Amino acid sequence: MEIFSIEIISPTKFKVFKDVLSCQIDTNEGQIQIFSNHTNFCSSINLGEISIQQNNEEISIHIYGGSVNFDNELNHFKIFCLDFNDEKEIFNSIEEISKIINKDSESSFHFLFSEDNKIALEKIQ
């Protein structure tokens, strides 16, 4: 299977993925999947998730608004966004928030995670 590259660019971060097999992303027109040598493509995106497939690894990136552009001549996919985080960054941020909440409170709290990526804060009795 042929490969392509992806750049994710925000005002404060920049990340490159090489040897990408496919990329699935939610656009304003609907969910699309990009493969190597895709036709030229441009769309806007809202809050959503990008799933990047590299060899036997799937990477999830959370995107916060922007636009996407696939250049067929360069076989390159660019994602311009307000911000992005991978799942590890989000989990680390949640752990830090939890420590701050529990430090400044007489009660203890913990986060609950649902299958659809929603987060809730629960007071521990």
Image (cartoon, grey):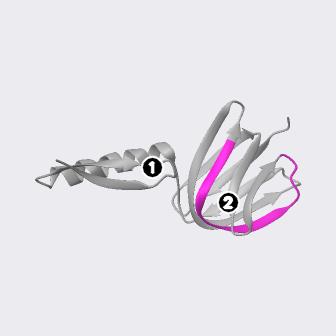
Q: Quadrant of residue 9?
A: bottom right
Q: Where residue 2 appears, x then y in whole percent?
A: 85, 38
Q: Quadrant of residue 54?
A: top right
Specify the amino acid type for callout 2: Asp
Q: Where residue 17 appears, x then y in whole percent?
A: 67, 43
Say the numbered circle drawn on residue 80.
none
Q: Calculate the distance from the C-alpha at mark 2 to the C-alpha at mark 1.
A: 20 Å
Q: At x 67% / y 60%, what residue is drawn?
A: 26
Kindly state the secondary structure of the residue where label 2 is placed.
Answer: strand
Please name the residue that numbered disc 1 is placed on: 114
Q: Quadrant of residue 48?
A: bottom right
Q: Which residues are magenta?
A: 36-52
Relative to residue 100, is residue 54 drawn left or right? right
Q: At x 27% / y 52%, what residue is drawn?
A: 122
First along the sequence among labels 2 and 1: 2
Q: How many marks?
A: 2
Please name the residue that numbered disc 2 is placed on: 26
